[in-house]
Amino acid sequence: MFTIDEKLFPVFQSPVTGAPLAASDGVLRAGDETYSIQNGIPCFVPSDDYAANFGAQWNRFLKTQLDSYTGLPISRDRLRRCLGEELWLQLRGKVILECGCGAGRFTEVLLAEGAKVMSVDLSVAVDANARNCPIAENHRIAKADLTRLPFAPRQFDVVICIGVIQHTPNSEETIARLYDQVKPDGWLIIDHYTHEKGRWSSVKPLVRAYMKRVKPEVTLSVVETMVDIFLPWHRRFRNVYPAWFLLCRISPIVTFYRLIPELSEPLQREWATLDSHDSLTDWFKHLRTAEQIEACLRGLNVAGLHTTENGNGIEARCRRPA
């Protein structure tokens, strides 16, 4: 039977009308509205929409980016940097809304730090998340659109959205809807792709234009073929700069030989396949400068705004004034 402890987490409400939802006969119901509950996960969207490829990749690469799988603190270090030391040291007991949870690379870190986590994703990645980080007293999962979240505003201590906003239809709208969920004196933690040098001198945008039109059920096999062809060359020339530079212009795949050399060869292949699929099949790939992200957040009247260029692009954190 589906239950949720209202003392630990905000209650679900209709993303359409805002009416409170009650569990009844295996669904959440408010008047004529009903939302299914599948394996303990409420579903507030009828399909994966533009995120279908993401759902497929996270269920295929279920554990690839989990620190518990790699034995390296890759996700932990990235999350800690985005949060900042002040918030990192206060995670225990915080009620956190994790948006775009994927397979749970950050979920497992947050839970290990003693947070209470509500994980949300638009895609069937929620199933992968539940397998890696099972639903429990301190962890709940929902399938929902980040711009139409099934919660009343201003109920979460922390809202985290890392590696996601650039893939939504409108970055500024998504940021505003995420900020809606932050409590007074609570935190918003986000990142966003920014402009890269050499982006248009690479074949990747052309390959992505083609891959966006490939059926989701075959994109992974196409990317795996690309990795078969190009990964040996990346491995061979990883420490030969002129050759590496040219290779990165003509190769469509993403590799980690230089960025995370500690990964074993099997993991290098997994990460290359996963990230290449991620970067070549996303329907939306918005780019923003630090100034644009700052302008968006200042327009929401945030406090304590901090931005830096790191990781995937621009990382930002701020608070809702008390």
Image (cartoon, grey):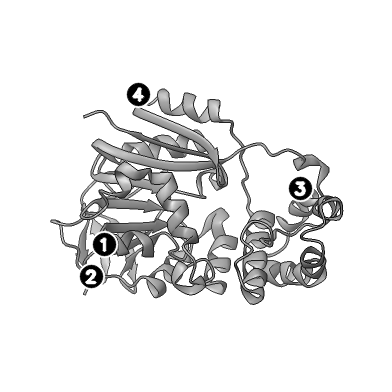
Query: How far apart, in angstroms, are the residues tagged by discs 3 and 2?
Result: 44 Å
| Percent x, y of residue 132 | 41, 73
| Circle 2 crowding by C-alpha within 10 Å: few under 14, some 14–19, many from 20 | some
Q: Residue at x 50, y 60 (%)?
A: 74
Which residue is nearer to you in this view: 282 or 149?
A: 282
Marks 2 and 1 in Cβ contact (< 8 Å) = yes
Is 129 located above or below residue 176 in the figure? below
Earlier-in-chain disc, 4 versus 2: 2
Depth check, mark 2 against mark 1: the one in front is 2
Q: CA distance from mark 1 to mark 4?
A: 34 Å
The residue that mark 2 highlights is 2
Residue 171 x %, y %: 52, 37
Q: Position of residue 192 (x, y in %)?
A: 54, 41
Corner quadrant of residue 183: top left
Q: What residue is shown with label 4?
A: 301
Under mark 4, the amino acid is Asn
User: Which residue matches tag 1?
Assistant: 28
Is residue 170 visible in the rendered structure shown here?
Answer: no
Find the distance from the CA under tag 4 to the CA under tag 3: 35 Å
How many numbered marks does the figure carry? 4
Marks 1/3: CA–CA distance = 42 Å
Q: CA distance from mark 2 to mark 1?
A: 9 Å
Q: Tag 4, which secondary structure?
A: loop
Q: Is residue 29 visible?
A: yes
Q: Which residue is mark 3?
A: 205
Query: For the residue marked with disc 2, what is the amino acid?
Result: Phe
Task: Tell me the mark number nearer the camera, choosing from 4 and 2.
Answer: 4
Farthest residue to the left: give it.
7
Q: Are marks 4 and 3 in contact (CB under 8 Å)?
A: no
Q: Helix, strand, or loop for circle 3?
A: helix
